[in-house]
Amino acid sequence: MTVFDRGAALVPDIVTEAEEERILLRISQAPWLTDLNRRVQHYGFRYNYRGTANGRHDPAPPFPRWAEVVADRLASHFGGRLPEQCIVNEYRPGQGIGMHADHASFGPVVVSLSLGDAWTMNFRPRSARPYVRGGLASDEIALLPRRSALVLRGQARSAWMHGIDRAANAHRAATRVFATFRTVSS
């Protein structure tokens, strides 16, 4: 069984081309944090990469208008609940993120909007080795199209890791922006 048989889904065209262009413009005009190997923006709650609560108590600026509109559109994937946290990650060619699962302090559904370019993402069961340079031959690889949303729920959220392989995406011509929406577990 694949990660897409275990609760992952790709929803195409969550935003239109014109909306994507406006969202990318607004994102580019907002301040970026640069303390990682990529640029990020946090809204609602800050994602604490080293803490155990991972943002449950670290407020961040409120959602900008573009994120409110997207959050409203994604609410059905969260059982009608509006997401309370959004992190925007910018990946330039040759950048990526290691295999990981979103922290359990966030809710049971995670939805990420792909903007700017279609990139691949690797998926691997959590029972496998998380840190293997170059990935494992058994990794599942999915192309995430522009303007699509990746929905992770069920075992895809809790029992699988995901990451972006730096080498696999080094040849990409364009930057990819990924806006990930989460609820905060109570």
Image (cartoon, rainbow, N blue to C red):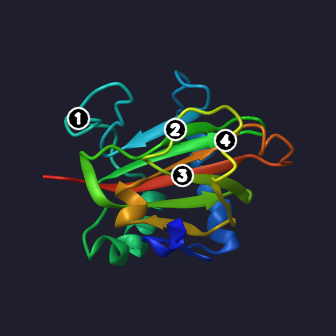
Q: Dot 4 lies on which element?
A: loop
Q: Amino acid at mark 3?
A: Arg
**Is there a contact, CB below 8 Å, between mark 3 and mark 4?**
yes
Q: Pick whichever of labels 3 and 2 is earlier in the sequence.
A: 3
Residue at 27% of width from left, 76% of height from top? 79
Residue at 19% of width from left, 53% of height from top? 185
Q: CA distance from mark 3 to mark 4?
A: 9 Å
Q: CA distance from mark 1 to mark 4?
A: 28 Å
* Residue 90 x, y percent position in the rendering: 62, 41
Q: Pick whichever of labels 2 and 4 is earlier in the sequence.
A: 2
Residues packed near mark 1 inside 10 Å, few (<14), some (14 to 19) or many (20 plus): some
Label placed on residue 109: none
Q: CA distance from mark 3 to mark 2?
A: 9 Å
Residues packed near mark 4 inside 10 Å, few (<14), some (14 to 19) or many (20 plus): many
Q: Is residue 176 above or below residue 82?
A: above
Q: Pick whichever of labels 3 and 1 is earlier in the sequence.
A: 1
Q: Is residue 114 above or below residue 17?
A: above
Residue annotated with mark 3: 124
Q: CA distance from mark 3 to mark 1?
A: 24 Å
Q: Amino acid at mark 1?
A: Ala
Q: Amino acid at mark 2?
A: Arg
Q: Pick whichever of labels 3 and 4 is earlier in the sequence.
A: 3
Residue annotated with mark 1: 53
Residue at 49% of width from left, 75% of height from top? 5
Farthest residue to the top: give it: 35
Q: Is residue 53 above or below residue 127?
A: above
